Each structure stands twice: as C-alpha cells, then as structure tokens.
C-alpha cells in the first residue's frame, strides 16, 4: 500500500509535541522545577507564584486554542482540495448530462499524440440529433434538456466502457476502441437505432433521428484530433443527405466541407448586404393569354457577375439557420416591388419546407405585409407536399392562420412528393402546380399525359386553379390549353427578370405580342 504523507498542520503538531517533550526531559534532568521553587521562596515578597500560575493557565488555554485552530485549518485545507477537484470536474464535463466535454476530448487527443507508441485503435463517431430543434421550439427547453439526458444515458449504456462526449447543444462524440468491434459501420447503425427509439415524457411522445459520421484512427489520420474533425465532416455530409444516415469519412469530404463553409460565410455577407434579390417570372392565364402575376425567385449575383443557383445556396441557408432571415428579407423586398404593379397582379412566393415547422411563421409574414402595406389577397404562398408532411400539426395551424387572413396557398410540385388526396381534403389550397418533370415529357409519354389530364380534372372537380410549370415549347402551351389548364409558367412565357424590367413594361409587351 502507498504511504500516506502527513499534511502541513499535522507536521506542525508533531514539531510542537517534540519541542514539548524535549523541554520536559530537560526540566526533569536539570531539576528546573526545584530551582524555580527555590527562586520563588527566596523572593516571597513578590507575587511570583501567582504570576507563574497565571502563565501556566494561559499556556494551557493557548494550547487548547492552537489545537482548535489547527483543526479548523485542516478542515479548510480539505475543503479547498475538494473544491479544486470539483472545479477540475466541472471544467472537463458537461453539467447537464455529466458526460465529458470538448476540453476532456482535447486532453484525450493530446495524450494520444504523446503516447504515439500505443497500438490502440478507435472508431470515432460524431452524432448530431435530427429534430431536436423542433423539441425545443414546440415543447420548451425543459423537455429539450430531458431529451439530451436520455440520449446521453442511451449512448452510455451502448458504450459502457468507452468515451462518450457531449460537445454542443445536440452534438455527441464517441471514441470506441475497435478491439471487439470489428464492424464500425454496424456499430454506427446501432447508434441510429438506439437514438431513434421514441422518448415519452409526461405523456408526450418525442421522435428523434441521428446523423452519424464515422472516421477510423489511425487509418483516417495520425492525429486523433484530426480524425475527430474528419468524423464531424462526415456527419455534416450525412446530415445534408437526409435523416438517420451513417456516413464513413472519405478525403473528398474535406473539399466539400471547405466549400460549404466558404459559401456559408459568403451567404452571411450577401444577406447582410442584401445582395440576394427577387427576380420575377410571369404567371400567364393560358385562356386569356395575359399575365396575372409573378413568382418571386431568389437570385444571388456575385461581385464577379456570376449567378449562384438557388439549389446551391438555399440548402446552405437552411442548414446554417439563415433561411428565416433570408426569407423575411426577400419577402419584404418582393412585397415592396409588388406595390408598383397593377392591383390585379398576384405575388407568388415560395416557402422553405423547414419553415412550416415554425409556429411563428404566419405572424411574421402577416407583419411584413402590414409593414409594407400589401393586401394579403394579392399574395400567394407556395408550399410543397413534403413540407406539410414534416410537421403536419404545425403546418396546419400556420396555413389556416394565413388563409383566414386572406393569403392564398398553392400546393407546389404536385405529383413528385406524397401526392396524397388527404392533403387536398385537409388543407384549403387555392392552386395546384403541376411539376415541370411531367410537362417536359407528357407530349411523348402517354402515362405522363394521363397524369396531367387527371390532375386538371381533379382541380376542376375541387374548384382549384391548376398551374403548369416548365413550359418551354409552343406545342406544350397549346396542348395544356386544350386540356383546360388554367395558368402556365416557363421560359416560353417569360424568364425570371429583375423588377426594373417589369416596371419598364417589357414583360407585358412580350406576352401580348405572342398572343
């Protein structure tokens, strides 16, 4: 057993006891007591005996006081040592889940660099929860904290002898030794399965998913810290591609991640400077051959004069949490532009699928309309089937509030999503938009032609306007007009243009001349 080292107060007690014993022995050997008695007796005229008695009592009391103070000092030292241990623990652990934090992970990675001769190999898993923000937004942070604790417990139970870390709000990392775990990908799938089991709190059922990135040490890097970053890179790719995916790291992901980070930075700057603006594509009444409105489409022109496609920057805005700011900015600009149009022209505006999970979306839109002064009946919001499915309850509340305020709702990309008739019966849609993928080939594809006929007939039966997207040929326009399609949109009828061309009247002239 290791020897216990005495503390400083204990050493001081031993020193004073030693001095006392030394003086006692000298007094006994040299007869100090008899000599002192003789001295007092020879000077009996002075109260030396009383003075000596008082000194003896004071010394005894001082001894007791010293013992008490030494005891207090020992307790204080013990408390300080315990406090230092607690501070070290808090600095290296997440106080909510009690899991090791990023600082602890950095120390583990640093130790691995020092001990490079170790043959220990790891599978590193970076885990990001899918749907956690919805829990915080709809149920509150208290429920979110309970969910995080439950996730931490599940991961700790799955990896009882491994390192499990919580790095951020809903981000976890697992360092799993590969000895006994020959298939890291299968282990990643188990992580997804464990987290994917429903949570129930106070009769509230919460469903989460997980995006998992996997990197191997030392195959994917000699530095364990670098391997952790690689697993995080793989996790970002998994999150971008969908829900409940396990994505192994490959070197090409670094380039993709660096590109996305650069684009996110450029996107933030573009939003701050309002460089992303709406362009307007005409919506044409196929029967009367006249423009009835414009759809606002986001366009980002860089300083070099190049346009970045919305298919590239919109997903980045969604992932970076910038979509709300970007949408509000574009909608406000589009509503302001629409004030300069004739009162019978409609502004059509697309909503991001993830925005329909925001219960405050309707209030923000109506506030913008009120601030600008554009009547709600002149605004048409386009939503996709997939957006409604993601959070049907919240989507229903948001859309009902907008419809009750007079805003029109269009079901976009009909036929490419779930195409459930229940969507048409459960929601009040003013328009159904046939996706361009059907229009592109329906003239040569009999099945596609029948699908378009069925959608147009469905719209007529429900009293809903039908719009066909992607019209690029005159024969397409003519065929859709013969089938009874109400509205057309596409390059044949007009390309997206800036507001300056609309106010100059060029767009109206082109459409009327074609008639």
Image (spheres, rainbow, N blue to C red):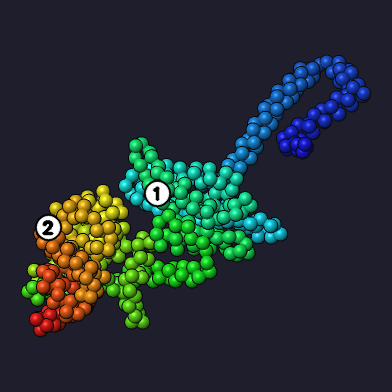
Compared to residue 344, the image places residue 63 above or below, namely above
Give the residue displayed 89% in from the left and 18% down from the top. 34
Question: Considering depth in this image, is 236 or 277 the residue closer to the camera?
Answer: 236
Task: Specify the label residue 208 is tagged with.
Answer: 1
Position of 43 with respect to 348 (left or right) is: right
Give the residue displayed 63% in from the left and 40% down from the top. 81
Question: Where residue 305 sits in the image (x, y, percent)?
Answer: 33, 82
Compared to residue 463, the image places residue 7 above or below, namely above
Question: Considering depth in this image, is 270 or 80 the residue closer to the camera?
Answer: 270
Look at the numbered discs 2 and 1 and tell me whether their residues touch, using CB distance below 8 Å: no
Residue 31 occupies quadrant = top right
Residue 75 occupies quadrant = top right
Density class for disc 1 (Cα within 10 Å; few <14, some 14-19, many ≥20) is many
Residue designated by label 2: 462
Give the residue displayed 69% in from the left and 60% down from the top. 116
Give the residue displayed 19% in from the left and 51% down from the top. 426
Question: Where residue 209 sits in the image (x, y, percent)?
Answer: 41, 51
Q: CA distance from mark 2 to mark 1?
A: 37 Å
Position of 76 with respect to 417 (left or right) is: right
Q: Which residue sits furthest left?
A: 288
Q: Tell me the SS state at disc 2.
A: helix
Position of 182 with respect to 272 (left or right) is: right
Task: Specify the label residue 14 is tagged with.
Answer: none
Question: Considering depth in this image, is 431 or 443 the residue closer to the camera?
Answer: 443
Density class for disc 2 (Cα within 10 Å; few <14, some 14-19, many ≥20) is few
Q: Quadrant of the N terminus?
A: top right
Question: Where residue 319 sits in the image (x, y, percent)?
Answer: 38, 61
Question: Considering depth in this image, is 191 or 399 the residue closer to the camera?
Answer: 191
Residue 428 visible? The answer is yes
Residue 88 visible? The answer is no
Q: Tell me the SS state at disc 1.
A: loop
């Amino acid at each position: 057993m290791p020897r216990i080292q005495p503390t400083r107060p204990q050493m001081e007690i031993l020193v004073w006891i030693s001095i006392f014993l030394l003086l006692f022995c000298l007094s006994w050997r040299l007869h100090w007591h008899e000599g002192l008695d003789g001295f007092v007796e020879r000077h009996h005229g002075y109260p030396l005996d009383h003075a000596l008695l008082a000194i003896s009592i004071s010394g005894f009391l001082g001894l007791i006081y010293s013992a008490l103070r030494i005891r207090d000092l020992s307790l204080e030292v013990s408390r300080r040592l315990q406090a230092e241990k607690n501070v070290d623990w808090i600095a290296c652990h997440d106080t909510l889940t009690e899991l090791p934090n990023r600082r602890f992970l950095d120390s583990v990675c640093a130790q691995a660099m020092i001990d490079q001769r170790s043959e220990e190999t790891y599978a590193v898993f970076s885990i990001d929860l899918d749907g956690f923000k919805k829990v915080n937004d709809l149920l509150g942070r208290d429920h979110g904290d309970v969910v995080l604790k439950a996730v931490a417990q599940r991961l700790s139970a799955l990896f009882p002898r491994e390192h499990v870390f919580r790095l951020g709000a809903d981000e976890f990392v697992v360092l799993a030794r590969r000895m006994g775990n020959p298939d890291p990908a299968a282990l990643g799938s188990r992580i997804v399965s464990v987290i994917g089991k429903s949570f129930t709190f106070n009769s509230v059922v919460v469903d989460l998913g997980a995006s998992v990135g996997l990197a191997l040490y030392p195959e994917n890097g000699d530095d364990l810290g670098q391997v952790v970053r690689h697993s995080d890179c793989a996790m970002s790719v998994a999150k971008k591609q969908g829900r409940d995916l396990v994505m192994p790291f490959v070197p090409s992901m670094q380039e993709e991640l660096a590109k996305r980070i650069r684009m996110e930075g450029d996107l933030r700057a573009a939003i701050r400077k309002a460089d992303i603006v709406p362009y307007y594509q005409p919506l044409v009444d196929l029967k009367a051959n006249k423009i009835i409105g414009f759809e606002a489409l986001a366009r980002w022109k860089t300083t070099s004069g190049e346009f970045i496609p919305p298919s590239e920057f919109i997903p980045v805005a969604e992932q970076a949490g910038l979509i709300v700011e970007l949408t509000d900015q574009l909608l406000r600009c589009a509503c302001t532009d629409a004030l300069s149009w004739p009162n019978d022209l409609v502004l059509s505006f697309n909503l991001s699928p993830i925005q329909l999970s925001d219960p405050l979306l309707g209030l923000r839109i109506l506030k913008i309309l009120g601030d600008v002064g554009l009547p709600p009946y002149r605004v048409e919001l386009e939503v996709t089937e997939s957006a409604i499915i993601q959070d049907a309850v919240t989507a229903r509340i948001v859309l009902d509030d907008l419809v009750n305020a007079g805003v029109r709702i269009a079901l976009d990309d009909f036929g490419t999503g779930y195409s459930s008739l229940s969507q048409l019966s459960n929601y009040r849609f003013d328009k159904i938009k046939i996706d361009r993928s059907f229009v592109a080939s329906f003239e040569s594809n009999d099945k596609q032609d029948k699908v378009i006929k069925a959608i147009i007939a469905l719209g007529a039966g429900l009293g809903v306007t039908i719009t066909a997207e992607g019209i690029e040929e005159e024969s397409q326009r003519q065929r859709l007009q013969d089938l009874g399609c109400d509205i057309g949109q596409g390059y044949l009828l007009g390309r997206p243009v800036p507001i300056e061309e609309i106010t100059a009247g060029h767009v109206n002239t082109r459409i009327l001349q074609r008639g």
